[in-house]
Image (spheres, rainbow, N blue to C red):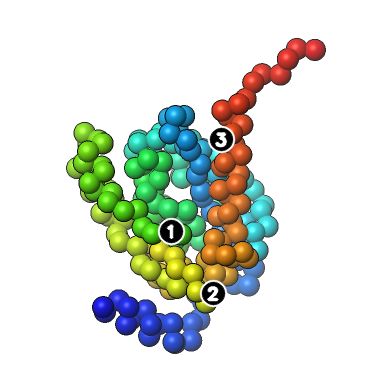
Amino acid sequence: MEWLSALARARRQPWRPPKFLQKNFKVVAIAESFSLEDGYSVYAGVLARRDGTIEDVALALARLGGVDGTRAAMEILDALMKPDASMIMLDGCIVSFYNWIDGEALWRKYGKPVACYVFEEPEGRVEDAVRKLFSDWEVRLEAYRRLGQPTPYYTQSGYRIYIRSWGIDPTGAGRAAEACAKFGKVPEPLRSAKIIASGARRFLRGARAPAAG
């Protein structure tokens, strides 16, 4: 396949990081956590250095099966984006039970490269599921198709991840992920965002007002 040959050639060539990926570059990373019975997903974003050191955190909610994933991501970016942030990292683009985050819209609004990572096999038969589940399936499929197909990327450690990107090529986005990864294949900022989203979701489910006294 042509893309495999091109990928192999790219991996053999010396790679020079874009100027914005300096030694201590920062990213805004967004991940989510949800349970189907809740009806919503908790999005967490972190402004973090490449080593995972967190400088700020923001949260948002999106509806499961909704069309507000991009809006939730923008709420987080409005709170966290700083001039010295080099890029935006997303833990998936098809999220929250077939909601979605429009990476191109984020790139155009914030002027920062956007990389969307999938760390397991891609989303599967999304089109078939959407046709069965949603009356507005045509609108959703158009949005999903605009995301494009993810590109496989193989890390130096032998992991395979899948990347959609805007404002940065998949090789650059893959190298950025590797630069931020300490353990396995998940970049530290995304790992931290996922942990925060999960903790916030558990808190919201079990939150009770403190007793008087």
Q: Residues within 10 Å of mark 1 (few under 14, many from 20)?
A: few
Indicate the secondary structure of the residue bearing disc 1. Answer: loop
When asked about the image quadrant of residue 111, the answer is: bottom left
Q: Which residue is mark 3?
A: 201
Q: Disc 2 and disc 3: Cα gap in Å? A: 32 Å
Identity of the amino acid at label 1? Glu
- Identified at 32% across, 78% down, the residue is 4
- 71 w.r.t. 85: above or below: above
Indicate the secondary structure of the residue bearing disc 2. Answer: loop
Among the two numbered marks 1 and 2 on one chain, the one whose residue lies closer to the N terminus: 1
Q: Nearer the viewer, mark 3 or mark 1?
A: 1
Disc on res. 8: none
Residue 137 visible at all: no
Give the percent coordinates (x, y) of residue 170: 40, 69
Give the percent coordinates (x, y) of residue 71: 41, 41
Say which of 84 and 39 sits in front.
39
- Identified at 22% across, 46% down, the residue is 128
Give the percent coordinates (x, y) of residue 24: 64, 68
Q: Disc 3 and disc 1: Cα gap in Å? A: 23 Å
Identity of the amino acid at label 2? Ser
Indicate the secondary structure of the residue bearing disc 3. Answer: helix
Q: Is residue 96 left or right of residue 155?
A: left
- 68 w.r.t. 142: above or below: above
Q: Which residue is mark 2?
A: 157
Residue 142 visible at all: yes
Among the two numbered marks 2 and 3 on one chain, the one whose residue lies closer to the N terminus: 2
Q: Which residue is mark 1?
A: 120
- 105 w.r.t. 156: above or below: above
Among the two numbered marks 3 and 1 on one chain, the one whose residue lies closer to the N terminus: 1
Identity of the amino acid at label 3? Arg
Q: Nearer the viewer, mark 2 or mark 3?
A: 2
